[in-house]
Image (cartoon, rainbow, N blue to C red):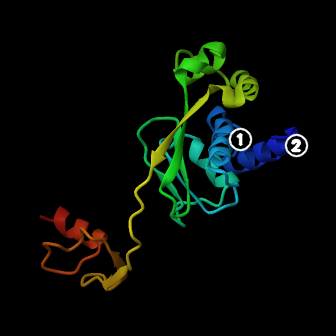
C-alpha cells in the first residue's frame, strides 16, 4: 500500500470512529490483508464477521460497504481481535487475527494488547504503523452460507404493529405477539 492510500484510510477511520484509537488503526491492515489474500477490493461485495465490539467494527464500516443494516457486517463478540472475511456467496474465507507470538518484536503493542499496563494511544499508534502486517496471521476458513429465506411479516395482536416473524417466534404461543408485547405480557406474570 502506498503511504497516501494508508493516510486516506486512516483519515476515514478516524472520522468514522471519532478519534484514532489503537484498535481502530489495527483494523486497517487487517481488512486490507484479508482482501489481498482473497483477491478482492474493499469496495467489493464482501462479508465480514468481527469478533469484538471494541473499535475494530468501526474500521470495517469506515473502509468497506459492510454494515450491520445490510447484513454484510456481523459482530460476534467473543473478545478476540479478529475478523473473518469472504466474498459474496463464496464459502472460502480468511480469518485474520493478531498473533501474540509475533508481538515479541513490538513490546508496546504487546503491553497494550495484553492489558499489562495502561498504554496511551500516542505511544501505541507509531508502533502499530511500524508493525503493520508483521503482527498478523491468517488461516483459511469455510463459511456456511445459509439460504436466503423470505421474510414473514405479521401484525401483533396487542399493539397492532407489523413485525418480522423469526423462526423461533410464536412456535408455542397462543397469540401472535411481537417481542416487545410478549416481553410485557411475560413480565406481568
Q: Earlier in the sequence, mark 2 or mark 1?
A: 2
Residue at image location 62% in from the left, 49% down from the top? 38
Residue at image location 67% in from the left, 61% down from the top? 44
- Report if the CB atoms under discs 2 and 1 are less than 8 Å apart: no
Image location of residue 54, percent across then percent down: 54, 40
Q: Which residue is mark 1?
A: 19
Say whether residue 74 is visible: yes
Left or right: 137 in relation to 161: right
Q: Which residue is mark 2?
A: 4
Front-lying residue, 37 or 182: 37
Which-is-in-front pick, marks 2 and 1? Answer: 2
Q: Is residue 133 above or below residue 54?
A: above
Residue at image location 19% in from the left, 62% down from the top? 187
Instruction: Point out the image quarter for the C terminus.
Output: bottom left
Instruction: Point out the image quarter for the N terminus.
Output: top right
On the image, which quarter does residue 157 sit in?
bottom left
Residue at image location 34% in from the left, 81% down from the top? 152
Say whether residue 118 is visible: no
Q: Which of the labelled discs sits on residue 62, or is there none?
A: none
Q: Is residue 122 above or below residue 55?
A: above
- Does dot 1 land on a helix, a strand or a loop? loop
Question: Disc 2 and disc 1: Cα gap in Å?
Answer: 19 Å
Image location of residue 86, percent across then percent down: 54, 54
Front-lying residue, 41 or 15: 41
Tell me the crowding category of disc 2: few under 14, some 14 to 19, or many 20 or more residues within 10 angstroms, Cα based. Answer: few
On the image, which quarter does residue 171 sit in?
bottom left
Image location of residue 37, percent across then percent down: 63, 44
Image location of residue 167, percent across then percent down: 27, 71
- Does dot 2 land on a helix, a strand or a loop? helix
Tell me the crowding category of disc 1: few under 14, some 14 to 19, or many 20 or more residues within 10 angstroms, Cα based. Answer: few
Q: Residue furthest right?
A: 4
Amino acid at each position: 500500500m502506498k503511504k497516501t492510500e494508508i493516510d486516506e484510510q486512516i483519515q476515514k477511520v478516524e472520522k468514522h470512529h471519532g478519534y484514532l484509537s489503537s484498535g481502530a488503526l489495527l483494523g486497517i491492515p487487517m481488512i486490507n490483508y484479508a482482501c489481498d489474500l482473497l483477491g478482492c477490493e474493499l469496495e467489493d461485495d464482501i462479508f465480514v464477521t468481527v469478533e469484538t465490539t471494541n473499535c475494530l467494527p468501526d474500521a470495517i464500516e469506515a473502509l468497506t460497504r459492510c454494515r450491520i443494516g445490510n447484513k454484510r457486517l456481523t459482530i460476534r463478540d467473543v473478545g478476540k481481535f479478529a475478523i473473518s472475511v469472504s466474498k459474496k456467496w463464496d464459502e472460502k474465507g480468511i480469518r485474520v487475527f493478531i498473533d501474540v507470538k509475533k508481538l515479541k518484536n513490538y513490546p508496546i503493542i504487546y503491553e497494550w494488547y495484553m492489558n499489562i499496563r495502561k498504554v496511551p494511544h500516542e505511544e501505541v499508534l507509531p508502533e502499530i504503523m511500524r508493525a503493520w502486517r508483521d503482527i498478523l496471521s491468517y488461516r483459511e476458513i469455510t463459511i456456511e452460507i445459509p439460504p436466503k429465506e423470505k421474510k414473514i411479516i405479521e401484525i401483533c395482536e396487542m399493539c397492532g404493529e407489523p413485525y418480522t416473524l423469526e423462526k423461533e417466534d410464536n412456535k408455542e404461543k397462543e397469540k401472535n405477539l411481537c417481542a416487545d408485547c410478549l416481553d410485557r405480557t411475560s413480565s406481568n406474570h
